[in-house]
Amino acid sequence: MSAAPSKKSVTVLGAGVQGLTVAWLLQAQGYNVTILARDSPLGWAQDSLYTSPKAGANWMSYAALDDKRLQKWDEVTYRFLHALATLKHTTVMRLPAEEYWDDAPGVQWFSQLTPN
């Protein structure tokens, strides 16, 4: 009888929003994940260098109408963040936003993806 295949190991550098998200996604896909970080989310309130929970973020695509590859990445990211905003144990939330332009941006590829 052969041994069960071993999980692949991955090391993620950084424990900010991006590092923890990547680590979480890799772990969900079956990887053994190790996170190496200078700053820790555990002491974020006292650590002025750990900014992830203190900084805001927003989703906006700047993909050109003909850049289908970047549009796909942006769509996956939008849908993932939208799903996180429905969970109670995350700090991701949907908030209203307005953008001001000197010149109207014209047709945006994501107008059917985002509500309002």
Image: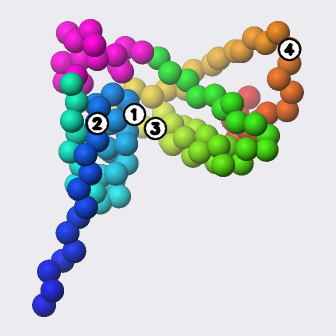
Circle 4: residue type:
Asp
Q: Is residue 73 above or below residue 100?
A: below
Q: Is residue 25 above or below residue 37?
A: below
Q: Position of residue 109 (x, y in %)?
A: 77, 39
The alpha-carbon separation of the residues under discs 3 and 1 comes to 14 Å
Label 4: element kind: loop
Q: Quadrant of residue 38?
A: top left
Residue 84 tag number: 3
Which residue occupies 20% across, 9% down? Answer: 46
Circle 3: residue type:
Leu
Asked whether the residues under the numbered discs 2 and 3 touch, taking CB atoms below 8 Å apart as contact, a structural biologist would say no
Asked whether the residues under the numbered discs 4 and 3 touch, taking CB atoms below 8 Å apart as contact, a structural biologist would say no
The alpha-carbon separation of the residues under discs 4 and 3 comes to 33 Å
Which residue occupies 20% across, 69% down? Answer: 6
Q: Is residue 83 above or below residue 89?
A: below
Residue assigned mark 1? 18
Q: Quadrant of residue 89?
A: top left
Q: Position of residue 103 (x, y in %)?
A: 86, 14
The alpha-carbon separation of the residues under discs 2 and 1 comes to 10 Å
Label 3: element kind: helix
Task: Give the foreground label among 2 and 3.
Answer: 2
Nearer the observer, 70 or 99: 70
Asked whether the residues under the numbered discs 3 and 1 touch, taking CB atoms below 8 Å apart as contact, a structural biologist would say no
Q: Relative to residue 20, is residue 47 drawn left or right?
A: left
Which residue occupies 82% across, 9% down? Answer: 102
Task: Give the foreground label among 4 and 3.
Answer: 4
Task: Give the foreground label among 2 and 1.
Answer: 2
Which residue occupies 82% across, 23% down? Answer: 105
Name which of mark 3 and mark 1 comes first in the sequence: 1
Asked whether the residues under the numbered discs 4 and 1 touch, taking CB atoms below 8 Å apart as contact, a structural biologist would say no
Residue assigned mark 4? 103
Name which of mark 4 and mark 3 comes first in the sequence: 3
